[in-house]
Amino acid sequence: MTLKSVLLGVLLPVLILLVWETGSRLRWWQPNILPGPGDIAQYMVESVRDGSLLKNIGATVSRLAVGFLLGLGAGLIFGSVTGFSRLISHLVDPFIQGMRAIPSIAWAPLFLIWLGIGEASKVALIALGVFFPIYLNLVAGFHGVDRKLIEVGRVHGLGSLALISRIILPAALPAFLTGVRGGLGLGWMFVVAAELLGASRGLGFLLDYGQNISRPEITLSSILLFAILGKLTDALVVALQRRVLSWQDTLGVAR
Amino acid sequence: MKINGIRIAALLIVVTFPGGGVAFAAPGPAVIRLDYATYNPVSLVLKDKGWAEADLGKDGIKVEWTLSEGSNRALAFLNSNSIDFGSTAGAAALVSRSNGNPIYGIYIYSKPEWTALVTLPGSGISRIQDLKGKKVAATIGTDPYIFLIRSLDTVGLGLSDIELVPLQHGDGANALVRKQVDAWAGLDPHMARVQVEDGATLFYRNPEFNTYGVLNVRKEFADKYPAYVDRVISLYEKAKGYARDHRPELIAILAREGQVKPEIAKIQIDQRTDLSVSTPGDAFRGTIAAAAQVLLKGGQIRPDVDVDAVIRDYIRPGFAEVALGGK
Amino acid sequence: MASRGETAVLAAVDLSRTFPNGTAAFRGLSFRIAEGEIVGILGTSGCGKSTLLRVIAGLDRGEGSITLHGDQITGLSPRIGLVFQEPRLMPWLTVKQNAAFGLSARGVSGEERERRVRAWLNLVDLEGFEDLYPKECSGGMAQRVALARCLATRPEILLLDEPFSSLDAFTRMQLQDVLFSIWEELRTTLILVTHDIDEALYLCDRILVLRGQPGTLACEMRVELPRPRPRGHEELGRLKERILVILDLNGHHVTAVEYNL
């Protein structure tokens, strides 16, 4: 990450901000349709002062964290088992592929009925979103392991479990981390759907709240924060990828 | 000048072609977008009878209908220029207006008792005080939400003393029935439904805290086409008169549109809907001003808002006075 | 045909291998290999020499008999090591970790493993390169690591399947010398499959020449010249010509006449 690349990356958002602020001040459009960055900043300052913004961010982030860990665990287990065993793969994979096609908004009412309006339904929804990319990528990672390497393991006397832990899992690590990155992204998206299920706190709640009381700057603040936090967590995974996958002999490590 | 056939034909075409050459009526919009809702039974009659399409169609104007599932939705549609006329509760519209939504309140479509605090028997809740620490479902930005705030205020409680569960009206009713919440700030016809089908009780009623059903119009539309605002009001008044004189049919239409049994619709219409008021007058102003005081206290209306000025700018009885001859 | 009363370590009697689809890789091979010998298996492609090595290693099962110290070989064994044509290093492990892979697979850890790995990396001339990743290694370096990995577990017999064929001629010669110096140190029995006649003549005590598809044993040749052998020696040249003649017979002997040239 050179200074030049950072500046280039920041150029477009800054330009958009300038045009946006200018346009809203000069009333190029109605303020009730699109508030300016100034109004958004004002709301954010107010809500930081009265503590509500941090509470809402905290609620969303903690839901996402728990859901993410659950989805990660499930993805690891199911992905490994399905990746390693052809039999289980034929049994389980078509079903999981079918479920994958169902959009998050469709799951929401089901989870609402099954798990109620508490945290359980929200965390479960997020975990579901996180699960699929991790599962799919891990299975692909397993299937893509070079058989020549496995043969080396067998020649050196490794049993099935040792083959998985010493060769297959490390070899599947790049695919797995790709899945983690995708799962995190989907997790953020599912958070919004989850928080529309009667959540009284969170960034998704703020999104809807702004709509309900005709304060679009609240909705926009929520969108902005989603973008920023989403990018931050994504950057963390990318940094992890760079560190852990530096051995890869590929064109680019984790862009 | 020789009179020849071509000149006569041209003259005839110009004179008879609609809108060509000489215009006698003020130009209107190409389409007028109305909303309908189960909490606005008059709108359901108007839509069912097709009078808007018939009347406005004479001027070549199309009519589009959008379902509003609550005041919050109707206000969002108005704010985003998705509808021209929207049905809401008076206090909800005031909050929205105070946040910048450019609307006028122009007509009262009903004076209902459409909201109350609802619970299931056996929940241990019989007074407002019992709500402390409990889960209460309500739709933010609507009359039941405001009703809840005002009710809590009467016993010195605020929203922070309960656990608010934001759900749209129908979902809130379902959550109550499934015992996922302890109480619900209800709205008809869902409220009547859970009374009849699930034995729910309205443990706190207060007709004074219900703030009228108001028809709102976007400022931009009203400033541009004031004559058509009058027209729509007249159409509404026609539908309202019909509704008053044909109660059984009104009940049938509501039952069909709200997907509830007729005896449930009957409760909402016969017991809790007053169709006698049309022009937004002092009584209406007083009601929403009272609501505003509580909302200022609770922070739902921002402290820097000049409530009186907002109310003055929002309520526009002029259109109804013109259309109805000052009823 | 074991050599001069030395102990036979490996014995094959009428060994064949037919694949499940019916194709035979090789047929009717019988040979004995003594302890400490360097034996080359030479042949053109398709004669089953790599398959033969896999059967000896225990990766595949053949028909007939193949014994190690008299016991039938039924599967993989820590006493038999195998070096492949590609280095097959684990890309996520450093040179040192790769070299230690065989040891840690067999449960050797700690100081013992450290010591042996360091010793082996020295032997293959990779001192100083311990922390490189395979992507930073040349083909020759990687194959050295593979050698170290295999030898660190001290197998009795080391099988090598065309280990240097993917390297350039000069690196190949270097690694042949590395292999020889390892053998001098350890006297491990080596069985080397190769298609490079010069390589076989440079390194081996005996050469089994396979011919045909499926492969059969065309001849067993002894190379008496003492090692290290000068590469251009005329004895080696004479033997090479003999091998070329052997390999040209009973194969696809194409003449100019047949092709109407």
Image (cartoon, rainbow, N blue to C red):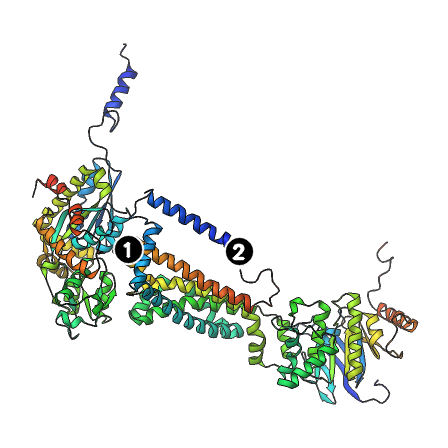
Q: How many C-alpha atoms fall within 10 Å of the one at disc 2: few (<14), some, or many (≥20)? A: few
Subunit bearing disc 2 = A
Q: Nearer the viewer, residue B186 or A79?
A: B186
Between discs 1 and 2, the one toward the N terminus:
2
Q: Quadrant of the N terminus of chain B?
A: top left
| Left or right: C195 in relation to A195 | right
**Image mark for residue A211:** 1
Give the amino acid type for the residue marked by disc 2 in the picture: Leu
Residue C73 in view here: yes
Subunit bearing disc 1 = A
Q: Nearer the viewer, residue C171 or B31?
A: C171
Q: CA distance from mark 1 to mark 2?
A: 39 Å
Tell me residue B157's x, y (percent): 17, 68
Query: Could you tell me which residue is drawn at 48 percent across and 62 percent down?
Result: A235
Q: Which residue is mark 2?
A: A3
| Left or right: B187 in relation to C230 | left
SS assignment at label 1: helix
Query: Could you tell me which residue is drawn at 13 percent across and 49 percent down?
Result: B108
